[in-house]
């Protein structure tokens, strides 16, 4: 076990006063809080910072820690001095917080008991809710889809000690028409309760896997069809892929009436990115086709004369 | 949407979010979660509200924020998330033209 230099974690000198400790914690907590930060490994960094603050904010714990710090030699594995008794000061202040798991080092110093403020009273506690992301292909949202999910549930004994996590596998039916970011609640599938408390819930958060062809806007599918300028000007036949079923041929034209002609089909919408005109016939769950002008990587052999627009 | 089916009353909500009713009243007062129904006894919360409330509680405790600060932070975080999604959406659309 390595000795943890809590002062270093908070970027402080050992003699720093309480105000400096608080300021340093607040600054780092804002930087690494998993609800706020996009930094890699933010959660672990936040836990480290929260643990350091847990010790240094309390005069009692800080005094104990400073005492031990004298024994610690840099670069050598840390062992508590002989006869050291964990003080049991490990107060749990964060409720259901991300910073609730302390390191082995912390527990060897202050003990794991007292993890929950009400531990020892054998209070009934409901199990934790668990959230997990469920990646879903767009094709899988069309019909009832059964997915097999595997996950781990945290488990605590009645006195708040962490027990090995339980591995669980479930077959989950995903209803058709789910939307991106939607939360599906599976009641009672979360972590087991403590002292006979109810199980928590499992929440699946739907994440659409980006599709190579289609984008999703609200409940609509959007297909972008790049057209060369001459195709847009002269009109051309394009074959449109669909998410379900065979491709459909369409007569398309980037700008003007022909493009809008396509849009009169009840279940389609055509928007020209060039002139931003679009059909108003938008139905929910429709396939929207968006034509846009694009220049091919190889220019055509006959190029438009420069200055032609002046004529 | 199936998430709209789940509705929690104030007691279930407090139990699931592990927060006292007094705190919930404050969270609602700051507009952090918006239940349906006029009086607290009639309030119904969605599962989305549950995740918002839990997140708000974490921010309040761990960043030592006032509730008004939490409300602002959540609003800005939502906006950032929205902009990130829009940004990646537009990038993807742009890449569809560049691939051609």
Image (cartoon, coloured by chain):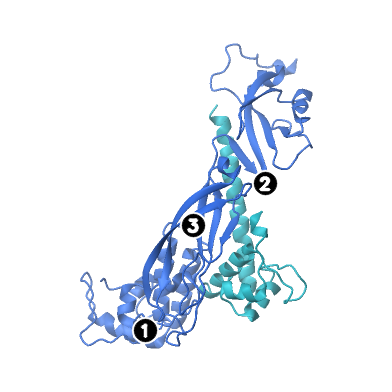
In the picture, one chain is cyan; tell me its letter. Answer: B
- Does A41 sit above or below residue A119? above
Crowd tier of the residue under label 3, counting other residues whose Cα lies within 10 Å: few below 14, some 14–19, many 20 or above? few
Q: Colour of chain A?
A: blue
Question: In the picture, residue A275 is in which quadrant?
Answer: top right
* SS at circle 2: loop
Q: Is residue B27 left or right of residue A126?
A: right
Q: Percent position (x, y) of residue B11?
A: 64, 76
Q: Are marks 3 and 1 on the same chain?
A: yes
* SS at circle 1: helix
Q: Residue at x 22, y 75 (%)?
A: A73
Q: Residue at x 43, y 65 (%)?
A: A153
Residue at mark 3 to residue at mark 1: CA–CA distance: 31 Å
- Chain ID of residue with mark 1: A
**In contact (CB < 8 Å): disc 1 and disc 2:** no
Crowd tier of the residue under label 2, counting other residues whose Cα lies within 10 Å: few below 14, some 14–19, many 20 or above? few
Question: In the picture, residue B31 is in which quadrant?
Answer: bottom right
Q: Which residue is mark 1?
A: A62
Q: Percent position (x, y) of residue A152?
A: 42, 62
Mark earlier in primary sequence (2, 3): 3
The disc label shown at residue A36, or none: none
* SS at circle 3: loop
Q: Which residue is mark 2?
A: A218
In the rendered image, which quarter contains the C terminus of chain B? top right
Q: Which residue is mark 3?
A: A38
- Nearer to the camera, A27 or A213: A213
Question: In the picture, residue B45 is in which quadrant?
Answer: bottom right
Q: Percent position (x, y) of residue A50?
A: 43, 73
- Nearer to the camera, A95 or A7: A95
């Amino acid at each position: 076990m390595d000795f943890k230099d809590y002062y270093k974690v908070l970027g402080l000198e050992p003699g720093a006063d309480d105000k400096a400790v608080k300021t340093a914690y607040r600054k780092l907590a804002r930087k690494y809080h998993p609800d706020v930060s996009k930094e890699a490994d933010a959660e672990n960094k936040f836990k480290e910072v929260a643990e350091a603050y847990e010790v240094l904010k309390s005069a009692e714990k800080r005094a104990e820690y400073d005492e031990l710090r004298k024994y610690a030699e840099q670069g050598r594995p840390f062992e508590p001095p002989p006869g050291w008794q964990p003080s049991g000061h490990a107060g749990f202040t964060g409720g259901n917080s991300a910073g609730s798991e302390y390191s082995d080092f912390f527990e060897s110093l202050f003990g794991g008991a007292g993890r929950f403020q009400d531990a020892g009273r054998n209070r009934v506690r409901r199990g934790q809710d668990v959230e997990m992301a469920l990646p879903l292909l767009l094709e899988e949202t069309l019909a009832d889809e059964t997915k097999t999910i595997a996950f781990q549930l945290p488990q605590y004994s009645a006195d708040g000690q962490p027990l090995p996590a339980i591995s669980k596998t479930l077959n989950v039916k995903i209803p058709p028409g789910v939307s991106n970011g939607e939360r599906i609640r599976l009641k009672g599938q979360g972590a087991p309760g403590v002292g006979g408390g109810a199980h928590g819930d499992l929440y699946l958060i739907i994440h659409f896997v980006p599709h190579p062809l289609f984008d999703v806007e609200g409940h609509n599918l959007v297909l972008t069809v790049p057209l060369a300028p001459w195709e847009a000007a002269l009109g051309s036949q394009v074959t449109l892929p669909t998410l379900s079923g065979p491709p459909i041929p369409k007569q398309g034209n980037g700008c003007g009436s022909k493009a809008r002609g396509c849009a009169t089909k009840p279940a389609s919408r055509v928007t020209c990115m060039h002139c931003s005109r679009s059909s108003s016939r938008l139905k929910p769950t429709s396939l929207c086709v968006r034509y846009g002008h694009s220049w091919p990587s190889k220019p055509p052999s006959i190029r438009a004369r420069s200055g032609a627009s002046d004529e | 949407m199936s998430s709209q089916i789940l509705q929690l009353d104030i007691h279930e909500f407090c139990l699931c979010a592990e927060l006292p009713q007094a705190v919930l009243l404050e969270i609602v007062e700051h507009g952090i979660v918006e239940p349906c129904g006029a009086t607290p006894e009639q309030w119904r919360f969605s599962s989305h509200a549950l995740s918002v409330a839990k997140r708000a509680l974490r921010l309040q405790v761990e960043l030592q924020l006032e509730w008004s600060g939490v409300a602002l932070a959540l609003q800005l975080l939502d906006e950032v998330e929205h902009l990130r999604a829009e940004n990646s959406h537009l990038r993807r659309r742009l890449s569809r033209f560049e691939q051609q």
